[in-house]
Amino acid sequence: MQVKVVSLAKCSATVPTINLVKETARELGIAIDFSHVVVKTAEEANFHRLIGSPTVQINGMDIEPQARGISRFGIT
């Protein structure tokens, strides 16, 4: 399972989110291929589908079902 956290550099919620993702996987006994991407440009935000910082994706899909249909990405 691929898990990616996409964030802005100064997002204060990023580290707690990363810790929660890793802890949850560990508690559930799920092996994950974890990556963290720091977005610096609007183009990167679009490419990585950054909806808000941080964004968590599993196998390329946002963990929030309502967010999966969003097509506007960016840096705010």
Image (tube, rainbow, N blue to C red):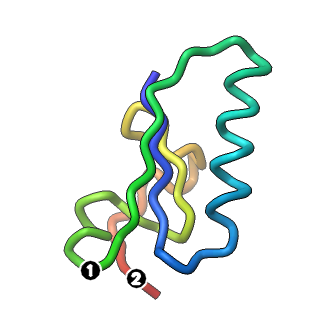
Q: Which mark is residue 42?
A: 1
- Which residue is drawn at the image coordinates 75% and 33% (left, top)? 23
- Which residue is drawn at the image coordinates 44% and 27% (left, top)? 33
Gap between marks 1 and 2 measured at Cα: 6 Å
Give the secondary structure at mark 2: loop
Vertical comparison of 67 with 25: above or below: below
Callout 1 amino acid = Ala
- Which residue is drawn at the image coordinates 70% and 45% (left, top)? 19
Give the secondary structure at mark 1: helix
| Residue ranking furthest to the right | 27
| Residue ranking furthest to the top | 29
Q: Position of 19 compared to 11: left or right?
A: right
Residue 59's spot in the image, x, y percent? 40, 31
Q: Which mark is residue 26?
A: none
* Camera-side residue of 73 and 9: 9
Residue 6's spot in the image, x, y percent? 45, 58
Vertical comparison of 72 with 2: above or below: below
- Dot 1 or dot 2: first in sequence order is 1
Tell me whether the residue at label 1 lies in contact with that at label 2, contact meaning CB atoms closer than 8 angstroms. yes
Q: Position of 38 compared to 53: left or right?
A: left
Circle 2 sits on which residue?
A: 75
Q: Quadrant of residue 42?
A: bottom left
